[in-house]
Amino acid sequence: MKTAIIKYNAGNIRSVQFALERLGVNGTVTDNHEEIMSADKVIFPGVGEASTAMQYLKERKLDQVIAGLQQPVLGICLGMQLLCKHSEENDTECIGVFDTAVKRFQSPVENLLKIPQIGWNNITGLHSVMFEHVPENAYMYFVHSYYAALGADTVAITNYVINYSAALQKDNFYAVQFHPEKSAEAGARIIENFLNL
């Protein structure tokens, strides 16, 4: 099985590679169109800022490549947000696979919840094949200031300030806001489920 990890100058790619290696899979980090399109599975991870990342993708026409992929694709963290239609982060038009808006957390003063959300939080309402054998209320590791609103493609929910999409799925596109590669056994199971699609 050939697994491509999309390279677009967004951090956190090495931890995804290590997570794949622990499952016995070698992931190729690439921005080559042919390598991405010919892969059996594509992972679109990332930590960073939306407008800079989209500019890099557009300059290399990777946004068009990603939107046209037919094989299973897994977006992680920033990768998930860039698969949505628009991000409030620097008013960024994104790839638009998911008809979902990405918004900034607005924490009420009396709430005292810190932005960004950093740390473990549980996921609920799991309904996707990527959550097979993952228990309801499993804890995942999150680091983010922006969130995907709830919508038709929501397949898992987390609450921090408000309820939002912890995961999205539409056709062959799967996406998670949390970091499965840093989420212990349950996170490894999600990656394994994706690889087994």
Image (spheres, rainbow, N blue to C red):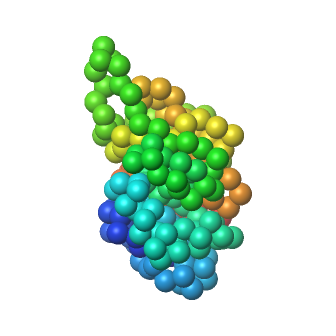
Residue 188 rendering spot, x and y as whole percentages = 46, 56
Q: Is residue 36 visible?
A: yes
| Placement of 196 over or under 153, stated as above or below | below
Q: Is residue 98 left or right of residue 11?
A: right
Q: Is residue 18 visible?
A: no
Q: Give above or below for 95 relative to 86.
A: below
| Residue 148 in picture, x, y percent from top left | 52, 41
Q: Is residue 47 left or right of residue 25?
A: left
Quarter of the figure with the N terminus: bottom right
Q: Position of residue 92 (x, y in %)?
A: 47, 52
Q: Nearer the viewer, residue 5 or 189?
A: 5
Residue at screen point 49% across, 83% down: 32
Identify the residue at the far top of this view. Answer: 110
Q: Residue at x 52, y 34 (%)?
A: 164
Task: Give the answer, above or below, for where 2 lies relative to 119.
Answer: below
- Figure check: 70 above or below 138: below
Q: Is residue 48 left or right of residue 123?
A: left
Q: Nearer the viewer, residue 1 or 34?
A: 34
Q: Residue at x 41, y 54 (%)?
A: 50
In the rendered image, the residue lying farthest to the bottom is 34
Q: Nearer the viewer, residue 48 or 30?
A: 48
Horizontal and vertical percent for residue 11? 32, 63
